Amino acid sequence: MKKKIKIGIIAVIVIAVVLFILNLVFRYFFYDKYKNYLSSYEVEKGKEFVPIEESKSDITGMELVAQNDNFKLYTNVETTEIAIVNKTTGDITYSNPQNREEDTIASITNKSELNSTLVVEYYNEARNGARINNYDMSIQYKQYTMESINDGIRYTYTLEEPDTTTGIVPLQISEQRFQTLILDKLSSKQGKTVKGKYKLKDGIYKLLDKAMESAIGMEKLNALFVEAGYTQEDQSLDMGEAQGKERMSFTIPLEYRLTQDGFEVSVPTSGIIEKGGAKIYRLELLKFLGAGGPEAKGYMVVPNGSGSIIEFNNGKTKDPSYSQYVYDLDPVTQSYVVIENTETARLPVFGIKNNNTSIFAVIENGDALACIDADVAGKLNTYNYVYVTFSLREMELLNMFGVTGTQADTPVLEKNIYDVNLKVSYTLLSGDQANYSGMANYYREKLIAEGVLQTSATNTLPFYLDILGGVETHEHIVGIPKRKITAMTTFDQAGKIVEELFQNDITNIRMNYMGWFNRGVYHDVPDKINVLSTLGGKRGMEKLSNKLEGQGGKLFGDVAFQKVTYTSKRFQYKLESSKYYSGYVVNFGVVNPASLRQTSTLGFYRELAYDVMSPKFLPRYVTKFSNKVNDINITGVGLRDLGSYLASDKKRTEVINRQMAKEIVKAQVDLLQKTGKQILVDGGNLYSLQYTSDIISAPITDSSFFIIDRQIPFYEMVIHGNIDYTGKPINLSDAYDKDNIVLQYIEYGVAPRFTFSYEDSSKIKYTSSAEKYSIQYKVWMEDAVSIYTELSGALNPVVNSNMISHEVLPSNLIKVRYDNGIVIYVNKTSNPITDDGVTVEATGYVVKEGVIL
């Protein structure tokens, strides 16, 4: 009997273990619902390239590839550059500067890049980084093919160093082999001559560009190598060809297609071939398309926060170039140390105005892998240019310790290139539309046509109100710490705040309630929803929602999906978090002001630290939350991070790159909207706009990069009249200047936003919500009413209209036009200005109605 009991117990344990393992495997390792949201693409089959015959070419030396009612696409089959002819205006846009050979600044390498259409950053087998371009390594040696595709042409480049470029002289050679094979075999004078042609870096001697400029010098250098007994086999070894190794090379397809608005360029990465152990890291595309020379008048438009202008030839040659990732840095690739606070580039666009024409670029695919770069004339060359760089795989620096105690960071690259059809559309604008306002108008109409934007139904300016609800606080009972939820604002108290706003004629209130469920502000994972009874429970929340909706307002329940606090009890962080390529879990905290590391809890408790949820498991939590939130009668859901935070996951059976993560996140916002709830997002990256009714923390400033000349409301011009938006809470701003805030908000069409609590802010002084240091509503009510009254008086007439023009007149008066005929003039100077038929007092504004457009 005892034996049977023993066997039974063992059987139960075994079954329990098996069930546990099966649950683990199917719940975490085999879970692949995220794949339902991933897209694929097909590569068009090319045909033999045959140019279109025409009696006379518009461009000497170029052949016609395609044409439509608006444009002609030409190419030079010897240089592979392209040109677009505008049939209406006759304007010609070139992929490369036409006077590039006259550049007085560019070195040999930089002149080569002026001739190129692709620049590749890569790491060789020895993990040394370098960059090459398709002119040096492909075009000048005719190592490319051409194919006709629908409405365009495909060039396939093979970037490979020919055998005869430098004769027997190697482009690079190790320090040891350089010494033993060359220097030791020559006289000291000869050795000094040879050594002067190379530069030593990281144990490798690399041949200088200047050494290759002189054909006579290369002949003498070849003779010295021969005298030293250096052979072709030696060169092959140094170039990585000996012992059965493949020569390093890259094969890259580049496609051009004519469109009704201009043309599009694509690089299907499935067609990229890497050989010789080298790995492509990043790809720069059409770097000098439409570039402006030293005599050109114009500027570059970059998506820096609200938008920025970089003027041509601004003289800022000692300042760093502009470089900014679209949707900010991938958290899985960024440093733990934060050295600057910047505004995010939330739209995947850029533009360049060159004299009377403009090019507006939209990154249609690969936007989450893109970085936008720009620079001015006088640094590397005499041109002003803006372009996109794509990351084809990511790289981590692995700290290695040697046997002697030395250490170094060794780059480790992901194994495979991301399989993405990188695509950028270029729209050619002329006339009155050849400026940043024209670019914004075009983009808005494009997004409307694609169903991303819809006309707003708002008739009065919204008032955005964050309410702080449940906050985790700590107390000690007989010396033992105990956590509890403190109600900073109950639902009934929030109702009292609302009533006071109603009495001041503020009714269109958009309330984002923070800390309403699952342990407050830094809540547990949202697969379950427990509305805090401390605040008044589900009934109290629904009553508040009804009160707001009765006056035309909305109630949004704030929720975080991707940043999972350390205090979350139902999250398996080792299995469900994003991971670095090295396998470590991705987690962060807040920035420590002393060390600048973003891993701190500032001496408080663990709720400020968080793990980054893998996009693999995001659908599971969003689906469960969507099912639960349906049972709560509130207007909508406020997405704390789903519209602004985009993380990849590097350590899975299948890597989830950032472009895949974007598709997954976008599908989850769509799922939430399909519950019937309205969606409020924080930040407002492009991929969330289609599903969004309201945006908080929209970018209404830019990052103050030194190369930037001025800030513009490009983001606002795109969405105004289609999505309601506001900035950061006014009462939590770093510097509170009421007059400046009002002027800025009127210029940018921004609704006001405040963060309120019913209880005094001192109650959260020593908590994880301590950064909300001044939010007691009575302190700010008078200012809130005053600011809203002034803003609504100016902006109510245009609240659902499109902002179609923004300009700074020569007098420094700012003029903003709307499509309903209203013009708003803003004077930010300390003196009155009379211009354009109106007089605007110092630090004032004028709303002019009935303007004929």
Image (cartoon, rainbow, N blue to C red):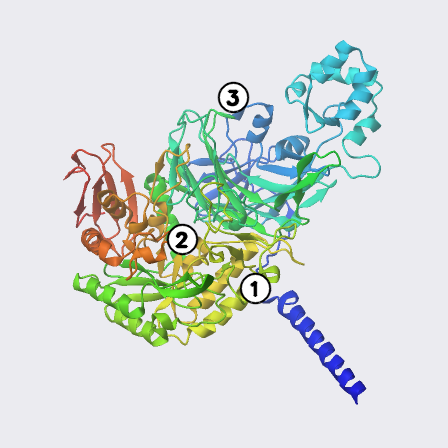
Q: Which residue is mark 3?
A: 105
Instruction: Mark yes or no: residue 362 visible.
Output: yes
If you read the primary sequence from the N terminus, does the residue marked by circle 3 or circle 2 appear first?
A: 3
Q: Secondary structure at mark 1?
A: loop
Q: Nearer the viewer, residue 93 or 842?
A: 842
Instruction: Mark yes or no: residue 452 visible.
Output: no
Q: Which residue is mark 1?
A: 617
Q: Residue furthest top?
A: 189
Label 2 packing within 10 angstroms: few (<14), some (14-19), many (20+): many
Q: What kind of residue is marked 2?
A: Gly
Q: Secondary structure at mark 3?
A: loop
Q: Are marks 3 and 2 in contact (CB under 8 Å)?
A: no
Say which of marks 1 and 3 sits in front.
1
Label 3 packing within 10 angstroms: few (<14), some (14-19), many (20+): some
Residue 193 in the image: above or below residue 646: above
Q: Residue furthest bottom?
A: 1
Residue 471: x %, y % from top left: 39, 62
Disc marking residue 224: none
Residue 747: x %, y % from top left: 26, 45
Residue ID at (83%, 39%): 244
Q: What kind of residue is marked 3?
A: Ile
Q: Secondary structure at mark 2?
A: loop
Q: Nearer the viewer, residue 835 or 316?
A: 316
Q: How many marks?
A: 3
How many angstroms separate mark 1 from mark 2 (CA)?
23 Å
Instruction: Identify the image quadrant of the N terminus.
Output: bottom right
Residue ID at (69%, 77%): 16
Q: Which residue is mark 2?
A: 683
Q: Is residue 437 left or right of residue 316?
A: left
How many angstroms separate mark 3 from mark 2 (CA)?
41 Å
Q: Nearer the viewer, residue 392 or 526?
A: 526
